[in-house]
């Protein structure tokens, strides 16, 4: 991919290279500062948080104590939040990605009455501000008695129109009509073709959509904030935000400052690590979808 | 092996008619080639036979049984696709076994059949590879192997060689011809390449705009094209065609040169066609036409001269004799082999003359 | 001909299955799509044409809530805030994303994949936690940025002041979503055929000219899509300002963005019906802005 093949060694090229790398390096520092701050803050006592320099460690390494506080406070409710987040995000992401894959496959590979209408609906839905739906969803869920349950967070999250849009593009790209026809000539039924031939060819796209859905649900705040009210059902986002509000609200909450930081650290680390491990997959899949988009 | 009969086949995509009204019988063990330009409906017709598209009207019979409403596998046909359509996540063996597994054949029989076909196609060394690790020619053979193991009543080929380079195409063409001899199978083969059609076919079906233009053996079509379309489509280089009309007892080209034809004057004559090999180059002033040599192509075995006889009207001549002497810019006369002229009416149909 | 026609069989199961398969593939998605998107939408609309009164219960009022929304300065102030926010945040975020994507794609920097991945990481950080992090960093008493200013004897930055709060929030959004957009651009750039680059080198174009004149125009469709998604995202702004209410109590009020307003109306003020109308008008604003933007882009294309 190198642009300046033969002139690689010229002084001008090296100069540009250093300059541009420095630009990226600056942005990297900007990206990393908040994360670094969370790391240092998690290792401090509350007084040190205010009295020592924010972007470096203090002498008193208090990380283990903060973590112990984090996991024992209010009968270890943080662990419940972590578990809730994990369950909500996993179930929602698996479900919505499977549904989006099936729907995207139907849109990409079949002609059927109503196709244009349904697809227009899906595209239109991508435009609808999700938050505009949360309040009516709250009211509907309360009527069927699902408020304050895991279902209240999971069921609405199974709708992922962007996933359908991405999967349609990916299916178009990854599976030729001839492959499906070959399966038909070989005697496989439509569902057999999907499960035994097509699905494996769709894995990169599936992984990408899954990761996007997982991150979106892992990060979700507004929906759980509205539909959940007992703390033991909260995901991390809602729980930490509550502690944070207590902390900055003054009176008595001050002790929570470092615990909130430790909680932030604990909840972002797994996702960051998962991202790093799986980057090969999501980058591949995003390519096909992104370009078509 | 099977006889395939198409009766009054019609196909519309929405409001657009793709196949007009096709009647055709493909005999047992015949290799029939559907040929035509893109948009002629040849691939659609094949897909109708395969059962991948549903007919709008008409019937498809295989050995007398109506299969019009059956799915592809139920018709017991197999098909080789233009892109090969190998399953990328499966190995060569799994690709070839898939259809048999779907049909729930015993494992031992699947293995026996796949191994036998792999032997015929010399695929033994590649059985555990994925398609992406194969060359174009190998993929083509796997696609053919996948079709053979199912022991179908007929084979369908949809432009199977168009993704190969020129040398490999010739090689695979010969392999398919050998395979046809060996299996003595009914085969329908679609191509836009008339050379493939001429070299492989027992019978060629020329299609244009969704209608059959002519059905016949390669040489029949070459010698006796039913209309201008077939005349120009079959044969390489193309047949030369000039506008002409009957003038009294003789025939006149547009540039005024005229000559007499044996027998009665052809009524309704509008165009005259003649193949490059039916012309000889003579001295300027001789022959029925005269013009200037524009370009000479020397292929070694053949030499083609392109002679302009009027603005925008270039005649291809296969030169014989002292071809070294032909040069661009030369004024030449063209002597036509009058007994081998093709005469066409204004509607493009061949005017048949008593011989 | 009918005399020779063989008896027709009924349509094979295979053929029928090909016809109904797409509906079965679509069914699970559509089921939830209707239950949790279409139905709530209709329900919200239904709510929005009623009004709850202290006496007489709930009654049908037609467009009254909409009339109220259209003339509600609190709502339009929120929309205005979002416009200011979007005009500030979107160009900076997408401009940086585009610049970095072009730099990374040109391959003339060190540690390409390191930068690509690390710029994307903030996307994995929940907006809530990103806001917490930046909230601490901005902190007027204990925040490290204040500490730095103090150490340098500079005036303390006022991140939560009336003039600075919007850029402060915009910064969080840039931090979170720049990398995501950059990755989309990188993917689009990678799809540009290699021989174009060779052709432009044959024409004597420099790497910069190639990036600006050839590559950039080729990913315009992708850029348009990211702009539209950014606009939609902006108009839904909720978590960041909502969490900062306690930090900047005098600046961020309960109608700071339309979403916060709708939330407060529904859950604090118990005005569900009016809240639904506000959500609908906000949806309308999203649609209109996206549509106008598309129109402007298409107009530009025609020229």
Image: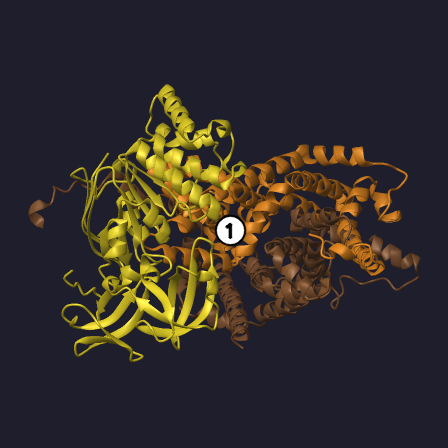
Chain colours: A orange, B yellow, C brown
* Total residue callouts: 1
Q: Which residue is tagged 1? A: A166
x and y, in percent, of residue B286 in the image: 33, 73
- Residue B353: x, y in percent? 16, 63
Q: Is residue A151 left or right of residue B315?
A: right
Q: Chain of mark 1?
A: A
Can residue A81 be seen at all in this image of the molecule? yes
Front-most of A194 and A237? A194
A145 to C202, vertically: above or below: above
| B227 relative to B289, above or below | above
Residue drawn at 63 percent across, 42 percent down: A280
Q: Quadrant of residue C61?
A: bottom left
User: Residue, x 31% and y 35% (percent of image)?
Assistant: B181
Question: B120 left or right of C211?
Answer: left
Image spot of residue B220 (x, y percent): 24, 52
| x and y, in percent, of residue C136 in the image | 77, 51
Q: Residue furthest top?
A: B108
- Res. B12 in view: no
Which quadrant holds residue B95?
top left
Q: Is residue C163 above or below residue A104?
A: below
Q: Secondary structure at mark 1?
A: helix
């Amino acid at each position: 991919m190198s642009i300046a093949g033969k002139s690689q060694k010229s002084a001008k090229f090296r100069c540009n290279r250093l300059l541009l790398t420095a630009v990226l390096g600056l942005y990297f520092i900007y990206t990393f500062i908040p994360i670094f701050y969370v790391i240092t803050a998690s290792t401090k006592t509350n007084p040190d948080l205010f009295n020592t320099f924010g972007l470096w460690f203090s002498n008193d390494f208090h990380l283990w104590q903060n973590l112990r506080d984090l996991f024992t406070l209010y009968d270890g409710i943080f662990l419940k939040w972590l578990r809730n987040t994990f369950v909500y995000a996993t179930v929602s992401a698996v479900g919505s990605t499977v549904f989006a894959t099936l729907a995207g496959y139907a849109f990409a590979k079949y002609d059927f009455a109503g196709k244009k209408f349904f697809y227009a609906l899906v595209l239109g839905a991508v435009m609808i501000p999700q938050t505009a739906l949360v309040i009516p969803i709250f009211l509907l869920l309360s009527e069927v008695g699902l408020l304050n349950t895991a279902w209240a967070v999971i069921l609405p999250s199974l709708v992922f129109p962007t996933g359908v849009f991405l999967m349609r593009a990916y299916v178009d790209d990854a599976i030729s009509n001839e492959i499906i026809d070959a399966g038909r000539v070989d005697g496989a039924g439509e569902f057999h073709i999907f499960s035994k031939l097509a699905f494996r060819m769709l894995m990169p796209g599936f992984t990408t959509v899954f990761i996007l859905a997982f991150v979106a649900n892992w990060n979700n705040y507004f929906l759980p904030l509205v539909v959940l009210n007992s703390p033991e059902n909260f995901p991390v986002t809602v729980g930490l935000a509550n502690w944070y509000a207590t902390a900055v609200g003054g009176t008595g909450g001050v002790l929570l400052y470092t615990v909130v930081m430790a909680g932030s650290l604990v909840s972002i680390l797994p996702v960051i690590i998962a991202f790093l491990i799986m980057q090969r997959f999501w980058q591949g899949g995003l390519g096909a979808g992104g370009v078509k988009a | 092996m099977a006889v395939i009969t198409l009766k009054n086949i019609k196909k519309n995509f929405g409001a657009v008619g793709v196949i007009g009204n096709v009647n055709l019988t493909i005999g047992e063990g015949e290799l029939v080639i559907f040929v035509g330009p893109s948009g002629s409906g040849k691939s659609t017709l094949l897909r109708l036979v395969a059962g991948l598209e549903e007919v709008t009207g008409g019937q498809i019979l295989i050995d007398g049984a109506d299969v019009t409403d059956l799915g592809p596998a139920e018709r017991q046909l197999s098909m080789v696709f233009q892109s090969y359509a190998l399953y990328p996540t499966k190995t060569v063996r799994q690709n070839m076994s898939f259809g048999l597994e779907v049909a729930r054949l015993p494992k031992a029989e699947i293995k026996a059949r796949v191994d036998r076909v792999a032997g015929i196609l010399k695929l033994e060394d590649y059985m555990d590879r994925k398609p992406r690790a194969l060359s174009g020619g190998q993929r083509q053979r796997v696609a053919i192997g996948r079709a053979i193991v199912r022991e179908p009543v007929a084979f369908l080929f949809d432009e199977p060689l168009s993704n190969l380079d020129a040398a490999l195409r010739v090689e695979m063409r010969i392999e398919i011809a050998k395979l046809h001899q060996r299996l003595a199978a009914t085969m329908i083969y679609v191509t836009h390449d008339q050379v493939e059609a001429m070299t492989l076919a027992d019978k060629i079906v020329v299609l244009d705009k969704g209608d059959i233009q002519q059905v016949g053996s390669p040489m029949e079509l070459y010698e006796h094209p039913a209309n201008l379309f077939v005349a120009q489509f079959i044969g390489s280089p193309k047949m030369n065609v000039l506008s002409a009309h009957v003038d009294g007892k003789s025939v006149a080209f547009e540039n005024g040169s005229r000559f007499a034809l044996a027998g009665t004057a052809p009524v309704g004559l509008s165009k005259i066609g003649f193949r490059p090999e039916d012309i000889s180059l003579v001295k300027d002033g001789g022959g029925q036409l005269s013009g200037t040599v524009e370009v000479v192509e020397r292929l070694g075995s053949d030499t083609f001269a392109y002679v302009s006889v009027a603005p925008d009207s270039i005649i291809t001549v296969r030169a014989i004799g002292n071809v070294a002497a032909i040069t661009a810019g030369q004024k030449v006369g063209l002597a036509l082999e009058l007994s081998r002229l093709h005469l066409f009416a204004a509607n493009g149909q061949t005017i048949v003359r008593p011989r | 001909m009918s005399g020779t026609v063989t008896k027709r069989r009924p349509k094979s199961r295979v053929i029928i299955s090909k016809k109904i398969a797409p509906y079965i593939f679509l069914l699970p998605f559509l089921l939830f799509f209707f239950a949790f998107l279409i139905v709530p939408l209709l329900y919200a609309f239904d709510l929005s044409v009623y009004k709850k009164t202290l006496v007489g219960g709930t009654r049908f009022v037609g467009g009254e809530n909409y009339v109220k929304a259209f003339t509600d300065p609190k709502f339009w102030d929120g929309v205005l805030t979002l416009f200011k926010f979007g005009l500030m945040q979107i160009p900076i975020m997408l401009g940086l994303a585009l610049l970095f994507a072009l730099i990374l794609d040109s391959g003339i920097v060190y540690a390409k994949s390191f930068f690509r991945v690390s710029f994307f990481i903030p996307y994995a950080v929940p907006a809530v936690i990103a806001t917490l992090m930046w909230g601490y960093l901005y902190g007027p008493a204990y925040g490290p940025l204040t500490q730095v200013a103090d150490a340098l004897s500079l005036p303390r930055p006022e991140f939560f002041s009336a003039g600075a709060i919007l850029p402060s929030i915009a910064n969080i959004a840039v931090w979170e979503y720049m990398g995501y957009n950059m990755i989309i651009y990188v993917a689009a750039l990678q799809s540009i055929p290699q021989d174009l680059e060779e052709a432009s080198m044959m024409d004597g174009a420099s790497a910069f000219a190639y990036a600006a004149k050839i590559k950039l125009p080729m990913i315009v469709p992708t850029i348009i899509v990211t702009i539209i998604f950014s606009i939609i995202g902006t108009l839904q702004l909720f978590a960041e300002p909502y969490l900062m209410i306690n930090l900047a109590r005098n600046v961020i009020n309960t109608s700071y963005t339309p979403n916060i307003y709708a939330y407060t109306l529904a859950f604090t003020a118990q005005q569900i019906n009016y809240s639904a109308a506000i959500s609908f008008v906000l949806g309308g604003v999203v649609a209109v802005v996206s549509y106008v933007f598309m129109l402007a882009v298409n107009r530009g294309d025609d020229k």
